[in-house]
Amino acid sequence: MNTRDLVLIALFAAIVVVLGLIPPITLGFIPVPITAQSMGVMLAGCILGAKRGALAFLLFLLLVAIGLPVLSGGRGGLAVFAGPSGGFILGWVVATFVTGLIAQRFVREGQPEVRQFVGFFLASIIGGIVVLYAIGMPWVSAVTGTPFITVATGSLAFLPGDILKAAIATLAARAVFAGYPLLHVRA
């Protein structure tokens, strides 16, 4: 790991903090808000790759744990990890790693642009949605005592927004991939 990697990790942790400035949207039927920070999972994984992206989110979680109000809605501190959103928040690290791993495997220089778009989009969907939901939904069910099927049904309301986030992350990742060739050397 070199200085450039450390700077990129810190930069993406800061980007996730900035995404937290967008106010959360709360839904009455599920205790987890809709936030823009989950798009950071897709962006970090696709742009930085598995290792650096996951490290960016570990740094971000450290900021949350020490009490800085960097989560959407100005939340922070250890208590948020024990709440209904805790599974999703902790799952960001794993989801970013998986997103980055898939992007690294499916997106290569010299491929047609369409294949690169498809690779980034699939990475964002699988890592940023499927893996994140697989970690977050059981957590919500366990913490709130709500049956899993009810949580899963309520989570369907998040899908349209998450697919839109995946599309935005795909466009951003492809633009960075094309414009900054030195960034593709992943740690």
Image: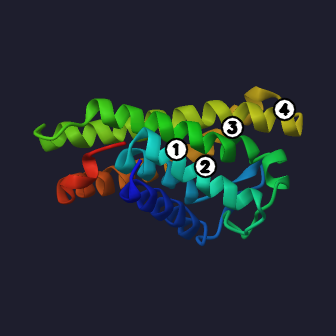
Which numbered disc flags the more N-terminal residue, 4 or 3?
3
Q: Position of residue 109 (x, y in %)?
A: 15, 41
Q: Which residue was labeled with disc 1?
A: 54
Badge 4 local density, few (<14 within 10 Å), some, or many (20+)? few
Q: Position of residue 93 (x, y in %)?
A: 58, 42
Amino acid type at image mark 3: Gly
In this rendering, the answer to whether 3 lies above or below 157 is below
Viewer can see residue 132 = yes
Q: Is residue 165 left or right of residue 58?
A: left
Alpha carbons under labels 4 and 3: distance apart? 10 Å
SS assignment at label 4: helix
SS assignment at label 2: helix
Which numbered disc flags the more N-terminal residue, 2 or 4?
2
Q: Which residue was labeled with disc 2?
A: 58
User: What residue do we see at 19% from left, 60% from top?
Assistant: 179
Alpha carbons under labels 2 and 1: distance apart? 6 Å
Alpha carbons under labels 2 and 4: distance apart? 24 Å
Mark 4 and mark 2 in contact (Cβ < 8 Å)? no
Quadrant of the snapshot with the C terminus: top left
In this rendering, the answer to whether 45 lies above or below 146 is below
* Furthest residue in direction right, as rendered: 145
Amino acid type at image mark 4: Ala
Amino acid type at image mark 2: Leu
Which numbered disc flags the more N-terminal residue, 4 or 1?
1
Amino acid type at image mark 1: Ala
Viewer can see residue 153 = no
Alpha carbons under labels 3 and 1: distance apart? 17 Å
Q: Which residue was labeled with disc 3?
A: 136
Mark 1 and mark 2 in contact (Cβ < 8 Å)? yes
Q: Which residue was labeled with disc 4?
A: 142
Instruction: Give the foreground label among 4 and 1.
Output: 1
